Structure formats: structure tokens, C-alpha cells
Amino acid sequence: MGELVLVRHGQTEWSRARRHTGRTDLPLTGEGERQAAALRPSLAARSVGRVVTSPLRRAVRTAELAGLTGAGTDPDLAEWDYGGYEGITTADIRRERPGWDLWRDGVVPGGPGHPGESLESVGARAARVLDRLAPLLGEEGPDVVLVAHSHVLRVLAVRWLGLPPSAGALFTLATGSLSTLGREHGRPVLTSWNVPPAP
């Protein structure tokens, strides 16, 4: 059957600095553009039937540079809204909240444009994406490629596997990486994870 191919966008200034980047619409860095273009050979070798990206420009641009044409956007693939933690590193948050963990403790409300979002809400968005794509992933179907962000893709992967959204904490995902989800004997499985772009 066709696989669900997950592509995390290339590097941005904030991802390089390990700052939480939810709805802030940042461009790729030069390195991020290189990472995205380096995905082209791996993706060109696949039979791709549909491409869907987050509406944020770092994802849209990654798809373009990776040679993915005809992409549509889906707001449910936008990154977790980190609320008051937008643009802040985990280390900085832990100075105020020792031991804080995003997957366990969540976020706090932020200012306009960053109200914050619960893990359950991210999980519900991921489930909606999977429900919409299910008819496209038949026995003989081509692959479906999703280009989005670290945390939302991690939640989507664990929802595919039938795990709770909090299990996304166990799956790291680097910028410019490629992962695949498929089926074995009818069971949803992880077929590859966090594969870096070619050097």
C-alpha cells in the first residue's frame, strides 16, 4: 500500500536556537533551504499521489524546494500553538517552572495570535488529518506526503499507531527529516523515522 510520508520543514532561525516556534511564520535559513532541496532525490523516487502542507511558509517552501508540486494546505497541519511560550526555549521556561515538560504540563495562554493549545487539541487535529487521508491510502495507492512541523507530526505519528498524543514525547524529529508510516498485515506501523536529508 501507499505510505504516509512525513517531512519536517527545514531549519529556521528559531529552530536553530531551539525556540518554540508555533504559529510565528518564519522563513527558512540558508541551511533550511539546503535541507529541503536535499530531500528531492528521496521524494522523487516515490510514487506520490497527494501532497499536503501546513499553511505556514516554512512548510510550503520546504515542499517547493523538495520538488513536491501541486501541494494543498491544511490548517490542521499547523504547529502546536505554544501560547505564552512562543519563541521561548525549554531552558528559559524551566527557569520559571523547574521540571516543566511540554508533553506533560502544556502551555500557558499568550497574547493576541497565541492563545495557546492543549495537547488534546493537537491530537484532535492530527486525527482529523488522518481521517481525511484514509481513503487515499488503499492497497494499491500511491504515497501521500505531509510537510509540516516537529510536534504536530510527532502527534500525528502516534495517533496513526493508536497511541495517545502524549506518546509523541518519545519521538524526536530533526529539521529537514523524512519519516514514513505504513501497514503490516493490516496493522498501522512505523516504517522509518527521522531520516536526515542527504549531505
Image: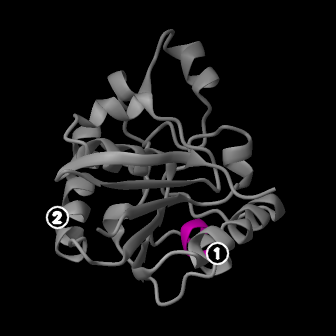
- Residue toward you, 95 or 154: 154
Residues in magenta, as a range: 57-61
Q: Residue at x 46, y 34 (%)?
A: 171
Figure check: 54 above or below 117:
below
Q: Which residue is mark 1?
A: 66
Colour mapping: one colour
Q: Amino acid at mark 2?
A: Asp
Q: On the rendered structure, is 46 left or right of 61?
A: left
Q: On the rendered structure, is 37 left or right of 58?
A: right
Q: Quadrant of residue 83?
A: top left
Q: Which residue is mark 2?
A: 131
Q: Residue at x 38, y 73 (%)?
A: 143
Residue 31 appears in the figure: yes
Q: Residue at x 48, y 57 (%)?
A: 23
How crowded pointer 1 is (Cα within 10 Å; few <14, some 14-19, many 20+) is rated as: many
| Image coords of residue 135 (percent x, y) | 17, 74
Q: On the rendered structure, is 145 left or right of 161?
A: right
Q: Quadrant of the C terminus?
A: bottom right
Q: Quadrant of the N terminus?
A: bottom left
Which is more N-terminal, label 1 or label 2? 1
| Image coords of residue 8 (percent x, y) | 55, 56
Q: Main secondary structure of the magenta part?
A: helix
Q: Quadrant of residue 47?
A: bottom left
